[in-house]
Image (cartoon, rainbow, N blue to C red):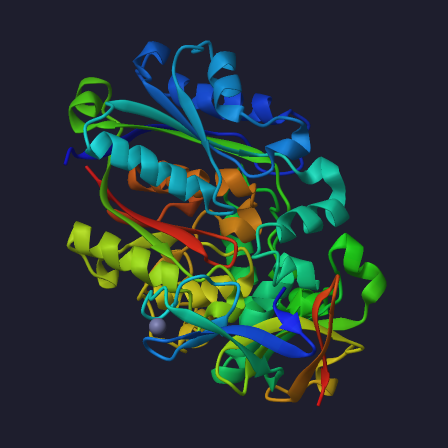
Amino acid sequence: MNKVCVTSVGSTKYGKLKESIVELAVDAASDAIKNSKIEPSDIQYGFISNVFGVADNQVHLAPVIMSSLGLPHVPGLTIESACGSGSVAFREAYANIAAGFYDVILVVGVEKVTHTGTGRSTTLFSYCSDFFYEGGSGASFPGLFASMARAYLTKYKATEEDLAMVAVKNHEHGIFNPKAHVKKKITVEDVMNSPEVASPLKFLDCCPFSDGASAVILCTEDFAKKHGEDYIEVIGSGRGASPAAVQGREDPTTIPSTRAAAQQAYKQANLTPKNIDFAEVHDCFTIAEMIDIEDLGFFDKGSAAMAVREGLTKLNQGEITINPSGGLKSKGHPIGATGIGQVVEVYEQLLGKADQRQVEDAEIGMTHNFGATGASCAVHIFKRV
Amino acid sequence: MTVKNKKVLAYKCKKCGNLQLATTIFCNKCSSQDLETVEVEGKGKIITYTIQNIAPEEYEKFKPYAWVVVKLDIGFNISGFLPGINSPKNLPINARVKIVDYDERGIILSLD
Ligand SMILES: [Zn+2]
């Protein structure tokens, strides 16, 4: 297998944005190209991760975006894997370069939903569930994670206040991210007093609906060396799957796809959870981050609440910095872009470009991103070169 | 369709004996294709749930309700719609429930 590197990144701000889905994607992609010594003509393939193109009247996104970039003859492919679309697209690009099919691939994640309003967005997101059993029985997306939260709080020594602390921490990190959607310090009381969305989850336990786009350029090590000094190496890549519906899982307090993907990535990188300096994890809801940091092996099962309470996941203060970008919770969650946005953060961190949110001595970073309630998942490990 | 006359349509694996919903085509334990259709009792206990304070658009009119995950006495899980629940105080984990109907809201349950 060829070594695979990330040689440039670009991103729009995340939030309620006025640009169209194509304009957002093109902004992020041109940002990534202009930030590098790569010529547009070097790009051999484009992977586009997106879920709700139809909400902005555009499907068949890949050729439209490649044409808008002035690359109408470069083939593209749109990939959908719910909220995990970005990491799954990244994985496909990684595999194509590792296998020697291509030398340079552009991956752009994009989403545009906020113009549809909260009611319509809630319905759209419910289509990411196993709709026959979940969305079609009145479960919203927060509702599904709320059911996981209730199971977790019943099984382990954890409280709704512990969940709130995840939100407080990620908002503290997001303050330092110029591209974050919600840059606002919040307290445990703010979370506890915010309206219930799906009990036991409250409004401030949930990430926002966001628009935005992020782009990365992957290439072979040879190409990276010839075209610029600023690159990081992908040293582990894993994919996992879980029963699509929550009802199909033996234990709703763990996500099998995360464990499987992480195990593969650790094995390939020849590392253990102790070697990871920081991780961007999928915190669509506060409970998700608690489950993630256990499933990724950073903390024992049932001990995430203790870790959060003791500040062990705060920027440069504990054992491992979790979500230095602010995570989905504060940075925002444009679902097709999220997994790519995580790679953008890891790139900036490993190259020491993260300013006030810089993780000290960051050498090894991880991204973890899943679709829906974890039916699909990809985990990647990156190394400073 | 997963429910008929308040019973759940299931597949029983002739090779390993596993029971699963009849909407999964091969055995999800041993991958055997040799399955027989059986009807199992629609009774069990709540393993987890949520109360949808904000519901998807078409379900707003059905509030209050809980979306519940139920472990059937027969062994596998289902999920469904439990009307009339407005507070966790009214629905302890492990509460007994039974299937009473099947309509556009999916499997309809009630406290047993
Ligand atoms: Zn079997």
Q: Closer to the camera, A101 or A267?
A: A101
Is A370 situated above or below A103? below
What residue is drawn where x is 75% and y is 61%? B104
Q: Position of residue B37 (x, y in %)?
A: 50, 73
Residue B72 found in image quarter: bottom right
Q: Position of residue A381 (x, y in %)?
A: 27, 48
Q: Closer to the camera, A162 or A102?
A: A102
Is A271 situated above or below B70? above
Q: Position of residue A92 (x, y in %)?
A: 33, 37
Is A221 situated above or below A37? below
Image quadrant of ligand 1 equals bottom left
Q: Position of residue A228 (x, y in %)?
A: 24, 21
Q: Closer to the camera, B29 or A233?
A: B29
Q: Is residue A140 visible?
A: no
Q: Closer to the camera, B74 or A339?
A: B74
The C terminus of chain A: image quadrant: top left
Is A74 situated above or below A158? above
Q: Is residue A181 visible?
A: yes
Check the image and name the residue furthest to the right. B61
What residue is drawn where x is 42% and y is 23%? A76
